[in-house]
């Protein structure tokens, strides 16, 4: 085992020193960026709640994406480029980099199955740690309010290991789908062979595919999000696959959905 770097320090002192080192490393990563990007990644002090923190992250990511340059060599079919921060991106025989803006956004936020940019991870983790104490009271009050609302309002099952979600829950930077548009989304899901299950005030849009459970989440304007699980009762934190079907897609919808679903299933562990 490596030697203890703090042989005469108490456990609490060692933890504090390690926390200080992590903070300095994060700051070093941020300060390697150009000034305008470093300033954007550090401009979180005005956030007074987790909702404002989420909005700040989204706005920061939009700013970073505006700095991305399309690389004509990355694809002949769509606009793709490399991360302006870490210079990362997928590398393949036909397409490289990240699709702009969708793929780049997932990379910068670490959404879904995307590997998060090391720079935004360092910046967002540093911001979250700096703001956490101030958010605790606000978060506890919000949590109690959500629990009360879940008892009476309509909710949606999006993950069997978690409580059903309110239709506006955690939609901090997304535009909720209005009721008339939700009907259209339900018709689209029905055409893809999803079944709508209602139990008390909980709705679930379900599809079984090759022994795997697929749950649809149509709460956001512009897309339906799908989550794929290896079982009907996954353990909390177990791996899941996600993908989106855009509202604007009209042609060959079933084929597009089947292709995306098949690709998503490949990212899951093999079923026993």
Image (tube, grey):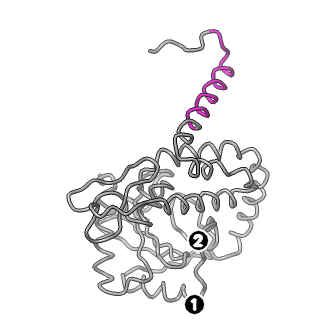
**What residue is shown at x 76% (from left), y 55% (from top)?**
48
What residue range appears in magenta?
A: 8-26
50 magenta-colored: no
Say whether residue 195 is left or right of residue 14. left
Question: Dot 1 corresponds to which residue?
Answer: 180
- Residue linked to disc 2: 174
Helix, strand or loop status at disc 1: helix
Residue farthest front in this picture: 35
Q: Which quadrant would the N terminus be assigned to in this image?
A: top left
Give me the residue at 35% from left, 68% from top.
Answer: 79
Return the residue nearer the eye: 251 or 68. Answer: 68
The residue mark sitting in front, 1 or 2, is 2
- Asked whether 141 or 104 is in front, the reply is 104
Residue at x 20%, y 58% (from the top left corner): 93
Rendered image quadrant of residue 139: bottom right
Residue 21: within the magenta?
A: yes
């Amino acid at each position: 085992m490596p030697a203890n770097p703090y042989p005469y320090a108490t456990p609490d002192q060692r933890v504090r020193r390690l926390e200080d080192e992590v903070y300095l490393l994060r700051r070093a990563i941020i300060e390697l960026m150009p000034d305008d990007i470093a300033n954007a990644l550090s401009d979180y002090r005005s956030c007074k709640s987790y909702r404002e923190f989420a909005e700040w992250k989204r706005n920061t990511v939009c700013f970073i994406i505006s700095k991305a340059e399309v690389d004509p060599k990355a694809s002949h079919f769509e606009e793709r480029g490399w991360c302006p921060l870490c210079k990362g991106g997928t590398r393949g025989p036909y397409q490289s980099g990240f699709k702009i803006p969708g793929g780049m956004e997932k990379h910068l936020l670490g959404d879904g199955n995307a590997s998060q940019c090391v720079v935004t991870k360092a910046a967002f983790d540093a911001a979250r740690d700096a703001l956490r104490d101030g958010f605790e009271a606000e978060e506890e009050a919000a949590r109690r309010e959500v629990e009360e609302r879940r008892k009476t309002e309509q909710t949606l099952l999006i993950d069997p290991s978690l409580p059903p979600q309110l239709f506006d829950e955690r939609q901090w930077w997304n535009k909720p789908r209005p009721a008339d548009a939700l009907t259209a989304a339900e018709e689209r899901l029905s055409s893809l062979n999803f079944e709508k299950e209602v139990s008390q005030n909980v709705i679930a849009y379900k599809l079984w595919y090759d022994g795997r459970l697929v749950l649809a989440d149509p709460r956001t304007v512009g897309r339906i999000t799908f989550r794929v699980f290896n079982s009907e009762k996954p353990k909390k934190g177990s791996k899941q696959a996600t993908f989106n079907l855009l509202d604007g897609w009209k042609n060959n919808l079933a084929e597009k959905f089947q292709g995306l679903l098949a690709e998503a299933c490949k990212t899951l562990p093999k079923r026993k």
